Amino acid sequence: MQLKKGDTVLVLSGKDRGKKGKVIQMLPKKDKLRVEGVNMVKKHQKAQGQVMQAGIVPMEAPMPKGKVMFVCPHCNQPSKIVRRALESGKNGRFCRRCGEVLER
Ligand SMILES: [Zn+2]
């Protein structure tokens, strides 16, 4: 999988199955990622000065990459990313379903 921060993914399993969200962080070393609004956990936070108040703060917990599937922004369907050379000669990411370039 060639996911990047900002990509939209569909959750395939777990309590958030069927949810879509944006990748907010990739953790390649752990083979995990964090998805906006998915796999929320409540984190207890201590007050830090006057800016942050103590309390329970919801945050996204990392989840395994294998539990999500890429959703193409062009065809809006779960798809796979393929790498192919662009006209410029650089490698680009393409949607396997509709063939659109995902970024340049
Ligand atoms: Zn597509």
Image (cartoon, helix red, strand yellow):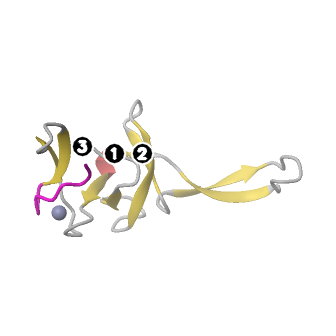
Q: What whole-number distance in Å separates the C-alpha atoms at marks 2 and 1?
A: 6 Å
Q: Secondary structure at mark 1?
A: helix
- Check contact, mark 3 vs mark 1: CB within 8 A: yes
Residue designated by label 2: 33
The segment highlighted magenta reads: 96-104
Disc 3 marks which amino acid?
Answer: Met
Q: Callout 3: few (<14), some (14-19), or many (20+) C-alpha neighbours within 10 Å?
A: few
Residue 45 coordinates in the image, percent (x, y): 75, 50
Disc 2 marks which amino acid?
Answer: Leu
Disc 1 marks which amino acid?
Answer: Lys
- Check contact, mark 2 vs mark 1: CB within 8 A: yes
Judged left or right of residue 36, residue 65 is left
Question: Which quadrant holds residue 75?
Answer: bottom left
Residue 6 coordinates in the image, percent (x, y): 40, 54
Q: Earlier in the sequence, mark 3 or mark 2?
A: 3
Residue 19 sits above or below residue 5 on the image: below
Residue 29 within the magenta-colored segment of the rendering? no
Question: Which quadrant holds residue 52?
Answer: bottom right
Q: Callout 2: few (<14), some (14-19), or many (20+) C-alpha neighbours within 10 Å?
A: many
Q: Earlier in the sequence, mark 2 or mark 1?
A: 2
Q: Secondary structure at mark 2?
A: strand
Residue designated by label 1: 65
Report the mark closest to the observer, 3 or 1. Answer: 3
Please give the label number shown on residue 1.
Answer: 3
Ligand 1's image quarter is bottom left
Question: Which quadrant holds residue 14?
Answer: bottom left
Q: Main secondary structure of the magenta part?
A: loop
Judged left or right of residue 10, residue 79 is left
